[in-house]
Image (cartoon, rainbow, N blue to C red):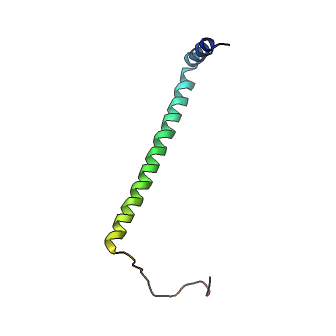
Amino acid sequence: MNTREAFRQSVSSIAAHKLRSFLTMFGITWEITSGILLVGLGKGFSRDQKDRLKTIGVDLAMVWGGRTCEQVGG
C-alpha cells in the first residue's frame, strides 16, 4: 500500500464517520486547551504567591503559640 492509497482511505473513513471524527478532534482540542490553561494558572498563582511573600519580608518566620494535639515528636 502506497502513501496515496493510505491517504485516500483515511479521508474516506473520516467522511464516512463524521460525528466520531468530530468528537475525536474536539476531545483532543479540549484536552490540549485545558492542559495549557491549568499549567498557566498554576504558574500564575505560584508567581503571585512568591510576589506576595516578598512584600512581607525576606528570611521571616511566623510562629503561633498554642497546643498541638499530637505527642512530642509526632
Please tell me whether residue 74 is drawn above or below residue 46 in the rendered image.
below
Q: Is residue 36 above or below residue 68?
A: above
Above or below, 22 against 36 in this view is above
73 over 15 or under it: above or below: below
| Residue shown at the point (57%, 84%) measured from the top left | 69
Tell me which residue sits at (40%, 58%) in the image: 45
Pick the front one: 71 or 46 = 46
Q: Position of residue 1 (x, y in %)?
A: 68, 13
Residue 46, image x and y in percent? 42, 60
The residue drawn where x is 53% and y is 34% is 28
**Camera-side residue: 31 or 67?**
31
As drawn, which residue projects farthest toward the left? 55
Query: Looking at the rendering, in which quadrant would you find the C terminus?
Result: bottom right
* Residue name at image x 49 percent, y 35 percent: 29
Quarter of the figure with residue 57: bottom left
The quadrant in which residue 2 appears is top right
Which residue in the rendered view is the most extreme toward the right? Answer: 1
Residue 47 lies, in percent from the top left, at 38, 59
* Count of numbered badges drawn on the protein: 0
Q: Quadrant of residue 13?
A: top right
